[in-house]
Each structure stands twice: as structure tokens, then as C-alpha cells.
Image (spheres, rainbow, N blue to C red):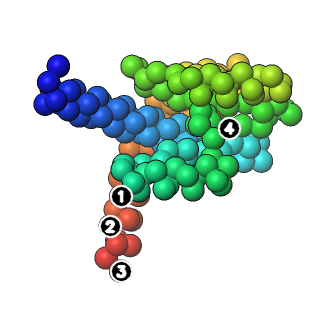
Amino acid sequence: MNEATHAQKLAEAGAIRRYRQAKERKLQCAVIVYLNMNFPQEDLPHWAVNNNISGGGQSSVIQGKMAKDMGVLAGVFDLHFLYKGIFRVIELKVPGGTISKSQREYEKNIIKHGGECYYCYSAREVHEVLKSWGLNPKYEPAIVNERSKKLMTQMAVMKELYRRD
């Protein structure tokens, strides 16, 4: 394989990875809206962990070192919950997304210490997992998805207004 072909394949792989990451971000935003509409923090403590270090080149190496020094761990799942004394985590994936070795290691460690781990590929799957815990969500994810689109539009307008000031 010549250098040009290799570079092109790397660029295509990077574009696919960025596309999947963008879809996972959208899925996570929809799930967070769904969670916040259904479960106040006092009923279901939940939080997200942003473990992504973006960028590239030397800047990315420096950011990665700083993040590691601050305790950021590879493989940490997207969503964390504490419910009925049990620590539970959900990793969100989109179709075609893969589970990394570090995520499998994180999963083993959480289970070893009595926690529970789940992989979900849609807001509907998150909904079903929460119901399996004995929770009764008021809203279905499909309803929330429409509302989240409106919310995202409102947020974009607000960002634009703040940017003008």
C-alpha cells in the first residue's frame, strides 16, 4: 500500500470515528434530557462523565497528560447512578460503535466491587434498563426526543444571544 492510500484510509477512519462520536454525543444529550425530565436528583442521583480529550498533535498529548494527572481514567462509562445503595453505570453506544478494552476493564472492576454495568444503544434501551431497576419513568424516550429537539434549538438560540454580548 502506498503512502497516499494509507493516508486516505486513515483520514476515512478518522471521519467515521468523528461521525460516531457526534452521534453518541447526540444520544447522550437526549438521554440526559430524558433523565432530567423523569428523575430529579433527589430521586435518582445521576451524572455524566466527560472523558473525551479532543484535539490532536502535541496539544492532545499535553491535554492527555494533564487529564491523567487529574485522575481521568480510560474506559470510564458515560452515565453514573447511585440507586438503592448500588452504584450503576451505563455506557452509551451507537450501532457500529465498539466496546474498548479499557471499558471492559472498567466494567470488571465495577462488578468486582458490587456495582452494575450496562451497554445501551438507544434511549429506549436506557428506558428499559431503568424500568428493570424498579423505576417508573413518567415520560417515554420518544416523547422526550421531540422535546429535546426543541430544547436543543432553544439552547442554540440562547448561545447565539450570549455570544453577541
Calculate the distance from the C-alpha at mark 4 to the C-alpha at mark 3.
36 Å
The amino acid marked with disc number 4 is His
The amino acid marked with disc number 1 is Ala
**What residue did someone put label 4 on?**
80
**What residue did someone put label 1 on?**
156
Calculate the distance from the C-alpha at mark 3 to the C-alpha at mark 2.
9 Å
Calculate the distance from the C-alpha at mark 4 to the C-alpha at mark 1.
26 Å
Classify 57 as above or below 136.
below
Q: Quadrant of residue 132?
A: top right
**What residue did someone put label 2 on?**
160
Report if the CB atoms under discs 1 and 2 are less than 8 Å apart: yes
Classify 129 as above or below 141.
above
Report if the CB atoms under discs 3 and 1 are less than 8 Å apart: no
Residue at the farthest bottom position: 165
Residue 144 percent location from the top left of the image:
49, 37
Look at 57% across and 56% down and name the residue there.
Answer: 66
Residue 108 percent location from the top left of the image:
72, 21
Numbered tag placed on residue 165 in the rendering: 3
Which one is closest to the eye, mark 4 or mark 1? 4
